[in-house]
Amino acid sequence: MAVTQPTTVAAPDGPRYLPAASIRRRARLEQTVYGATALGMTITPHLAGQPAPLTLTAGVIAAGTLYRLYTKASDTLGLIKSAQKALPALTGTGVYLTNTFHPGTTWWEYLLPAGWAITMAAITPLTHAANLHTLHPTSDGDQAIPALQEAPTTAPAASVPTTYAEHRTHQWATARPTGTTQLTTVHQYQDNAPDFWGIVVAEAGETVPDLNPTTLAGIFDLPVGTVTLHLIDGSGPGRKLLQARPTLDTEAATQQDPIHRLFTEKLARPGGGADGMHLTAHRTERNRIALRVTAPDAQMIRLNQKQIARSLGYKDHSLVMVETDGLGDGIVSIYKNHPLQDVREATVDDLTMRPDGTVQIGVRHDGRPARMPLYDPEMGAVTDLFVGAPGAGKSVALLTVLVAERLSGVVSIVADAQNGMSLPEADGRVYHFGKGIAATGATLAAFNELGAYREKISAANGWGSFEIGQPWALVNGTFDELNRILSSDADVPRPFRAWVSGLVSDGQATGRKLGKGIRFAAQNIHLAELGDKDKIRANAKNGTVWLGRTNSSTTQHMATDGVLPPGVTLDPIQRYFKTGSDIDAAFSGQEAQNGPITAGMANIIQGGALFLSRVFRARKENKTYPHLIALMEAKPMTVLTPEEDQVFQDAYARWLPHAEALLAGDTDDEPDYETAGLDDEDDEPTPGSIKDRILDLLADGPQALKDIRHRMPDVAPGSVNNAMAELNQAGHVTPVNRGTYQLAN
């Protein structure tokens, strides 16, 4: 390979440019000299009658070296370079003289020279002090030796640039962010192209500043990201290599990028999980690779979490996280270890509401805060839905939200249909806590009468919207284990279920403008679990949906009901973090070991977007959570105004006996359906419930329509046929063959 040497004058203290092989040979030679010298320092002091001139010579070398350093004391840079060169001589003579004058022979006299040689060979101070630099390649594959000019001590005289190199040098010199540094030895990679490289030199004793990509691009009026500034191997921060490559090898570099190649070959191919999608950017972190993905023009983003994991060869699909905006943008995060296995405990600051109405209830998988609104300053009170199987951490998540409400001055009205067993820590620490099925119904009724009171006062005063503290506090109702009442197979009389269903629907419909939010929790979100009312499910998913570990049928219904953002295929959260492959354990005849439980981990859906998170850790001691209790008691409880309190307490006392009578089957106490906002329906389920039951049956696999009619004897055959036709038209089911259907996903 030819070497081109421009006719320029190098600065006396400037770098020397040599081929890489020459620099390596020089370093090896220096290392060999250290080895030979160490051998001599080990043997010579122990020879009988060693010559005195050797000892005298060593002393003279040491003294001369020290004097040389003394003469450089006024020149800081010169002193540093001289000290680097003097290091082998001073330390070597010190070792030799120590071995010479120490009487006798000890073990360390043999180790000391060897240690010196190893240290010097590792750092090669003479080679480094020579300020050698590797040659840079030119566009035709040759090597060019650039001549560095000495950094100017004064600003250059103004002149009109006449060459390309002078033009780029002038741009650098006149830019404010570059300070007193100068761009030297500018070379184009190829003629008639804007790509070039050069050396940026700072004044003596100063460093070249670190400039961001936008600033560098602005200096030369080139696209952002095409100009870089890097340290030079073997040189200090006073000299840096600048490269501008707006056109050179851009496409080839992209194709050679391993992340781009991985995405194109494995994920964007048909069946790869991101079929036809485009990778627009990526970022590599210590435990994560983040892929920024977009859909082609006029198409919706579609990312299949499980298929992506399979395409990558992962045996644990939970290490792949998918987030989208529901339109054309998405992020795929690929982890080495699960990022949510260890989370911290909550603090008062985390759980205190911000001006935007949100609190942090946990962390996202990428370390960002997992926030949920207690209130929307623009829209008013919100509706939330918490879903999770037993052991999914739903109760801890709800308790964390109740702690946030107390710390944020929100009145918490709570009812637990499981006789208070789901949220025992809330008992006595919130404004109202109803325990049991009857108490839940009475609490809902009183909650709605409170809203009616606020509506009456607001109308009388001409208040068009609600603002916290003017004059009332925000009130949020939390109703846990509501599926024990609203489920079609719940062990409660139909009149009671219909009454509660109407109360829930009315509470959601009228609460937003009255500062009265509602949050309910259930084992799943099938329509049948929400009182056979489409509007209940629709209102609930307009707020925050906290979806913990559930069964696969529930997750499937989320897609068909439209709760999941479009284009997202979500796999249920596993009960345990994986520590290995179950199949590998089965093949080897070993028992698979479970990792820590995933309690508290959930997919949060807000405004059509989904992200994976985990609620803050809660330590359990003596069947309770002392840290959360301490946080809750860190601030006094907020209560209703005296007038509101009277309305609520009177209503609760009035409705509780009616609820108990309805549960006992006393139809004389059945509520007036018309005034409750309900129709006096017959016993056939609503169309929404029929569709949901069909989807439940199809979750087990394709089935013939006649078999589905047979398995729903309480529904008229024509109603089943109509519901199936509507599901097919909406794209929730697809025909396998004549008369047989399956879920669309």
Image (tube, rainbow, N blue to C red):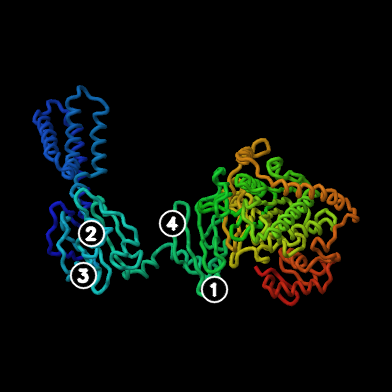
Labels 3 and 1 touching (C-beta < 8 A): no
Q: Give the spatial CA distance, label 4 vs label 3.
A: 37 Å
Q: Give the spatial CA distance, label 4 vs label 1.
A: 27 Å
Q: In the drawing, what numbered circle is on residue 199?
A: 2
Write down the residue under mark 4: 284
Q: Where is residue 514 in the image (x, y as percent from the top left)?
A: 68, 57
Q: Give the spatial CA distance, label 2 vs label 1.
A: 46 Å
Q: Quadrant of residue 538?
A: bottom right
Dot 3 or dot 1, earlier in sequence = 3
Q: Give the spatial CA distance, label 3 vs label 1.
A: 45 Å
Q: Where is residue 733 in the image (x, y as percent from the top left)?
A: 69, 71
Dot 4 or dot 3, earlier in sequence = 3
Q: In this view, does 30 lie above or below 115?
A: below
Q: Position of residue 360 (x, y in %)?
A: 56, 50
Q: Give the spatial CA distance, label 3 vs label 2.
A: 15 Å
Write down the residue under mark 3: 164
Name the kind of residue labelled 2 in the image: Ile
Write down the residue under mark 1: 299
Q: Residues within 10 Å of mark 2 (few under 14, many from 20)?
A: many
Q: Nearer the viewer, residue 39 or 60?
A: 60
